[in-house]
């Protein structure tokens, strides 16, 4: 098992990619603390699904775009789990509009949830990982952060910001054996992409050399590489996980 008795915090694991990461890590023996914004049916289901794999798992209510909420989430995790090895910053949203119509609220909301959250969570775990002299942080960006996209200036900026933040953190934390890497997925089938029109999905799929969209499990495997000893000499990386899409 690649993560036996490690403890991972995964933000936004009530569904989609975060849920798949939690499941994949649990299959490797990792105990999981995860969060969503409310204690809903999904959160309870994920807890049960992970516990059935034989690991400790608990869902927390946290808004990771809020500094105090992120601090409380990490403090509660440490109280419940005793230690911490891995942070996956996965929580994210979209709120699309053409720039000429995008409101300040749309901009602030997406930047706060997608980018400020990574700052908040990194700040919350840093003292713990620093003291123990080990840790792995994986941040979920997007190919949109590398290439831009129509109607997604807020999302593209947030995901590009994650890359800059991660590269800076990798430099600052490297001497303490804390690795920071980025996974930048392309088109992954989840609820987030569920309401994209069929026509656009077809168009995107013709641009993907592997001729299929990605799955949450594809992303989970990439995170497993960086979170485990398999990726022990990787830091400051950006993995393009997009089936070879040309402009990513
Ligand atoms: P999703 O299905 O919409 O899930 C988003 C998760 O984030 C949910 O668990 C949600 O929990 C949580 N969340 C949202 N805001 C939060 C907040 N303020 N605090 C705590 N949790 C919050 O999204 P997904 O498709 O799995 O995407 C996951 C990540 O991958 C995102 O960062 C996304 O940008 C990135 N990504 C996705 C794709 C894709 O094609 N799907 C491609 C590239 C990158 P609750 O709703 O329960 O609160």
Image: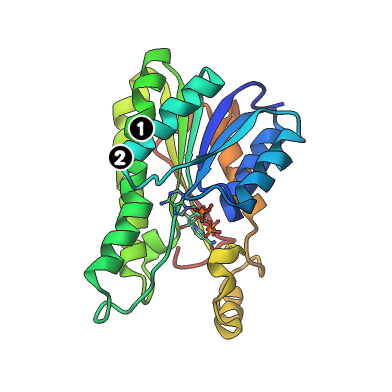
Quarter of the picture containing the C terminus is bottom left
Q: From the viewer's side, name the closer residue of 239 and 52.
A: 52
* Circles 2 and 1 in contact, beta carbons < 8 Å: yes
Q: Position of residue 111 (x, y in %)?
A: 30, 57
Which residue has dot 2 on it? 67
Residue 124 in the image: above or below residue 139: above
Position of 60 relative to 210 (above/below): above
Left or right of 103 in this view: 28:
right
Q: How packed is label 1: few (under 14 Cα within 10 Å), some, or many (20 or more)?
A: some
Residue 67 image-quadrant placement: top left
User: 182 or 47, which lies in front?
Assistant: 47
Residue at the (60%, 62%) spot, across then down? 190
Alpha carbons under labels 2 and 1: distance apart: 6 Å
Q: Is residue 17 left or right of residue 107?
A: right
Q: Residue at x 62, y 64 (%)?
A: 189
- The secondary element bearing badge 1 is classed as helix
Whether residue 133 can be seen here = yes
User: Residue 247 in the image: x percent, y percent?
Assistant: 44, 67
Where residue 126 sits in the image (x, y, percent)?
35, 26
x then y, percent, for residue 53: 76, 34
* SS type, badge 2: helix
Q: Which quadrant of the structure image shows residue 47?
A: top right
Q: Which residue is mark 1?
A: 71
* Mark 2 residue's CB less than 8 Å from ligand 1: no
Q: Residue at x 43, y 60 (%)?
A: 93
Is 67 drawn above or below residue 231 in the view shown? Answer: below
């Amino acid at each position: 098992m690649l993560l036996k008795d490690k403890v991972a915090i995964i933000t936004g694991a009530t569904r989609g990619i975060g849920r798949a990461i939690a499941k994949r890590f649990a299959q490797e023996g990792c105990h999981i603390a995860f969060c969503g914004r409310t204690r809903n049916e999904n959160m309870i289901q994920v807890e049960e699904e992970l516990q059935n794999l034989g690991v400790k798992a608990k869902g927390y209510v946290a808004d990771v775009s809020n500094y105090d909420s992120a601090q409380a989430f990490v403090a509660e995790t440490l109280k419940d789990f005793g230690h911490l090895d891995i942070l996956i910053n996965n929580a994210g949203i979209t709120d699309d509009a053409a720039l000429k119509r995008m409101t300040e609220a749309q901009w602030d909301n997406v930047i706060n949830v997608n980018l400020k959250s990574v700052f908040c969570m990194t700040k919350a775990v840093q003292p713990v990982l620093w003291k123990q002299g080990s840790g792995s942080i994986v941040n979920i960006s997007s190919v949109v952060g590398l290439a831009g996209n129509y109607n997604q200036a807020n999302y593209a900026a947030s995901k590009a910001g994650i890359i800059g933040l991660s590269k800076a953190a990798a430099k600052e934390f490297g001497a303490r054996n804390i690795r920071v890497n980025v996974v930048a997925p392309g088109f992954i089938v989840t609820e987030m992409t569920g309401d994209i029109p069929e026509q656009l999905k077809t168009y995107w799929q013709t641009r993907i050399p592997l001729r299929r969209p990605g799955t949450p499990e594809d992303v989970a495997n990439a995170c497993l590489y960086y979170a485990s000893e398999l990726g022990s000499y990787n830091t400051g990386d950006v993995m393009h996980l997009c089936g070879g899409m040309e402009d990513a």
